[in-house]
Image (cartoon, grey):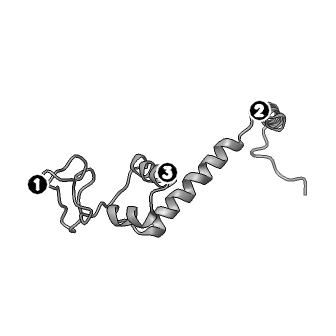
Amino acid sequence: MLNERKDGGVALGALEGARSATASAPSAAAEVKRWSAGRKKQVVLRLLRGESVDALSRELAVPIYRLEEWRDRALAGMDVGLKERENDPLEKQLDAAKARIGELVMEVEILRKEREARRPLVGRRSSR
């Protein structure tokens, strides 16, 4: 049987592998409250293969705007992944600059501690 929660929704993972008494697939009317990334990916792949958004929306009981949003995010993620460059010279310069900044920050901290050790500024009065 389905694991139902107090608020009327179906518990996470309750539909996976669930079958009715007639051994048919779980009904689309049962609402799934949370979609994992893997399940969303499977839906997006079905959309990219050319399945109808309307048919998927009815089958999965997910609004069309949500399916289109998942597809758009997946395509944007692919764009970002494909735009990455290997051995990008600007990336190398940025990494070198970050390393140099780190070295300079450490040097400043060391010099500050040395100065405070020689002449602590605590307890001094102003010359006014």
Q: Nearer the viewer, mark 2 or mark 3?
A: 3
Residue named by callout 1: 22
Q: Secondary structure at mark 2?
A: helix
Q: Quadrant of residue 11?
A: bottom left
Badge 3: residue crowd in 10 Å (few <14, some 14–19, many ≥20): few
Please tell me how crowded label 2 is: few (under 14), some (14-19), or many (20+) other residues with Cα within 10 Å: few
Q: Relative to residue 3, is residue 74 drawn left or right?
A: right
Looking at the rendered structure, the number of numbered marks drawn on it comes to: 3
Kindly identify the amino acid type of the residue bearing the numbered disc 2.
Met
For the residues bearing labels 1 and 2, Cβ distance under 8 angstroms:
no
Q: Which mark is residue 49?
A: 3
Q: Position of residue 2 (x, y in %)?
A: 16, 56
N-terminal label among 1 and 2: 1
Q: Using a 10 Å C-alpha cutoff, classify the residue at mark 1 as few (fewer than 14 neighbours), some (14 to 19) or many (20 or more).
A: few
Going by the image, does 107 lie left or right of 16? Answer: right
Q: Residue at x 17, y 60 (%)?
A: 4
- 36 vs 104: above or below: below
Return the residue nearer the eye: 107 or 126.
107
Tell me which amino acid carries mark 3: Arg
| 3D distance between C-alphas at marks 2 and 3 | 54 Å
Q: Secondary structure at mark 3?
A: loop
Q: Residue furthest right?
A: 128
Residue 42 lies left or right of residue 19; in this view the side is right
**What residue is pinned by disc 2?**
106
- Location of the N terminus by quadrant is bottom left
Query: Residue 10's image quarter?
Result: bottom left
Q: CA distance from mark 1 to mark 3?
A: 30 Å
Residue at the far left: name it: 21
Q: Amino acid at mark 1?
A: Thr
